[in-house]
Amino acid sequence: MNNEVPWWASESFWKKTAIWVTGIMFVVLIFLTMNTLPQISAGSARVPAYSVINKHIAYEFDDRRNIQVPVIGEDDPLFGEMLSEKQAEALVTHGKKVIQGRNCMGCHTLLGNGAYFAPDLTKAWLDPAWGSEAEREEMMLNFLLDPQENARSFGSGRTMPNLHLTEEEARAVIAFLKWMSAIDTNGFPYNFTVIEKEG
Ligand code: HEC
């Protein structure tokens, strides 16, 4: 009887294979990260700089691309205050941290991540249900400060719990939501092309 283990079943072969696969995938991951970063960084073609919160943002149909796209317009500063790029970045970043810290994603989706209990927040700034654009900021602020009293559940019967945000936190959240709504999310993930329709 031959008790010798064939080469492909030997421990050392699988050890080496594991090390090689891990090593190669690590390199692939670094390449993909480098390749994607310019597509997802603020200040790039699809993801506007943070100071976009100083501008009017619309969502319009683009005949050439055949999709809805965010359109950045005239000056329209958030809460009437023009911010420098640095100030805008600080405010939007603060808003992002509040959103992460309060786990809004436990109920909402942001840029494709999160849950489906509550409305997708990616374009919440552009939600026509806020009514007039002039009142939108105030309405969002009032809603975030007291979502029970200002519930707008549209017949779903679901309401948002009061998360006791401070006014400063709520304003930062609104800045983040405004910035996020200006991101052109069409064609993500990057490098995935549209499948041609047949017929
Ligand atoms: C326990 C679940 C839950 C959590 C956590 C939660 N929300 Fe909500 N949220 C809801 C529900 C349900 C609604 C829809 C009801 C409504 O609009 O009155 C809603 C609505 C909203 C809306 C209005 C969206 C629109 O376009 O109508 C915004 C903005 C919002 N939430 C922001 C937040 C933020 C920011 C956080 C984290 C700080 C958060 N929510 C955490 C449940 C949640």
Image (cartoon, helix red, strand yellow):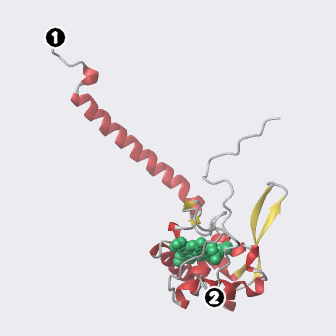
**Residue 142: assigned label:** 2
Q: Mark 1 touching mark 2, by CB under 8 A?
A: no
Q: Residue at x 29, y 22 (%)?
A: 8
Element type at mark 1: loop
Q: How many marks can you see?
A: 2
- Residue 172 in picture, x, y percent from top left: 56, 83
- Residue 133 in picture, x, y percent from top left: 77, 82
Judge the density around disc 2: few (<14), some (14-19), many (≥20) Cα neighbours within 10 Å.
some
Residue 53, by quadrant, is: bottom right
Of labels 1 and 2, earlier in sequence is 1
Residue behind mark 1: 2
Q: Disc 1 marks which amino acid?
A: Asn
* Placement of 148 over or under 199, stated as above or below: below
Q: Residue at x 54, y 62 (%)?
A: 115
- Tell whether 1 sits left or right of 53: left
Q: Disc 2 marks which amino acid?
A: Asn
- Residue 150 in picture, x, y percent from top left: 65, 84
Which marked residue is nearer to the observer: mark 1 or mark 2?
2
Q: Quadrant of the N terminus?
A: top left
Element type at mark 2: helix
- Tell whether 70 sits left or right of 150: right
Give the quadrant of ligand 1.
bottom right
